[in-house]
Amino acid sequence: MNPQAIIDGLVSGSTIGLGAIGLTLTYSILRFANFTHGDFLAWGAYLTLTVAGVLGGLAAGLGAPVYPFSFGWGLPLAILGGVVLTVTLALGLDRILFGRLRARGADAIIIVMASFGASMALRSLLEFIFTAKPAYFTKALQIANPLGFGMRATPDQLLVIGLTLLLVLALHLVVTHSATGRAMRAVSENPSLAGVYGIDVGKVIRVTWIIGAGMACIAGVMAGLLVQIRPYMGFDLLLPLFAAAILGGIGSIPGAMLGGLIIGLAEAFAVQIIGAEWRAAISFVILVLVLMLRPQGIFGQRGA
Amino acid sequence: MTALSLTDLRAGYDRDLPIVKGVSFTIEEGEAVCILGPNGAGKSTMIKAIAGLVPCFGGQVQLDDMDITGLPSHTLVRKGMGFVPQTENIFTRLTILENLQIAAQLLPRQARAGRIEAMLEMFPDLGSRPRELAGALSGGQRQMLAAARALLNEPRVLMLDEPSAGLSPKLVAQVFDTLRRISDAGVTLVLVEQNVRAALGLTDRALVLVDGRLAHDGPAADLHDGKLLGDLFLGHRAAEAGA
């Protein structure tokens, strides 16, 4: 077996894990499976690409690759703009759709179906605006550097893994040690009681969208940077995202990350052992196994 | 000075089938009042409507001289209203300290640590293990934590929904001792309670709710012998009042 599968798995697992964080937070605090989350990844990637294009038009030097990476300073700046725009999209969607359904006391299944419909609309809109033709942040070629033990990685890939770990650590600290994080955990356990404690539940919901959509945008950019950007990229990642969130335990940020890495590694090893055509099935198999054997996931609490 | 007043309050879960059907009363500052009534009388629904957790369909709720009708619960806490629900009244997946820290967020930053410390001293069972998960506490200790959380923000009016529910007699005595201390400190206390004897022993005044309507409002001492209360619970006096 080629040990390169470890690096491939960690890289794709980083994207899945980062994307699953938003999904797990939405699931635990808003109590519904948000199908639009995959589309936030795709929209995040396209919006960042658009901002990068605008920045490149304003200052051509921003697009020049910065050694050893394949992209220039324009991309980190564009990510900031992309995050703001993706968060705006998520907050807008909550205001015009999910928030109204919540206010009417709609059942979770109604909100899930609404998210399914919104997901299709967002995807079609993306295809209408940007066409189905793949787009790229960069077309620069990178040489994968040897890491030892038969593994290689490009600087971009190592950056993706490092940045993911940093973001997950920072988010974990926020959720476990800050007042905002305590309020999020409280709303996740009992929103009605949270109000009695003086927590503005609406504000916590907005923070959840901000974190979830922000992480989705960055995950979309990472996926786009390492492969390509397509309107369906988020939809294709949806099953691995759900599998990672449920495997890690709903509501757990380290759990979502660990779940993402496990899914990524399982996919990479499956490609080597049973063939690339089975890659997509792996997430499904893991999802079913977790639901049957440990429905609360790795870090989840039974009954949570 | 009036601390809490209800004027013709109608509330419930369905506008066409209100559970609270036009209740009016006033509670003076520093008073301890219990709300009694048979099961299904609308006691808990009324107290939840006051606390912003159940929709109000008509009438008015005033805290001091502020109209607080239908305001969301988190706003009411800031205005001086404390509420302890009957069940699920603490966050079991958070530690004791985290439960108090959440409540303390409403206080000025410099006052938070001091108030938390004061609550942990007031409830030694909690103070001895602040970093323990609240879910590990016994029923009585959970009520203590719920009361400590509500008191932390120094509410002018504290409402409790059946604080003795599910507790052993020993723990009920412990909880009511704590409530007496709170009342003695001048906090206006509104208590919905099924344990009539304990509630009447603690409070100055009793309101009896029957079928969503106020059937009696008078000194708690009047209900001690049980005869009047029995009549009220069975609807005899309510029928007379309505006739």
Image: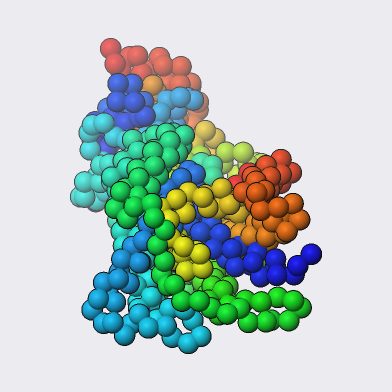
Position of residue B144 in the picture relative to residue A278 (left or right): left
Q: Is residue B93 above or below residue A222?
A: above
**Residue for point 40% across, 14% down:** B236
Give whichever of B81, B89 is nearer the camera: B89
- Which residue is farthest bottom? A67
- Which residue is farthest top? B243
Q: Residue A244 is drawn in which quadrant? A: bottom right
Give whichever of A194, B188 is nearer the camera: A194
Give whichever of A34, A121 is nearer the camera: A121
Q: Is residue A256 above or below residue B173?
A: below
**Residue for point 30% across, 21% down:** B16
Q: Locate the C terminus of chain B by quadrant.
A: top left
**Residue for point 69% across, 56% down:** A271
Residue A17, horizontal then vertical, whole percent: 57, 61
Residue B59, horizontal then vertical, whole percent: 22, 33
Residue A54, horizontal then vertical, whole percent: 26, 72
- Which residue is farthest right? A1
Q: Does residue B38 appear anywhere in the picture?
A: yes
Colour style of the rendered protein structure? rainbow
Q: Is residue A27 above or below residue B233?
A: below
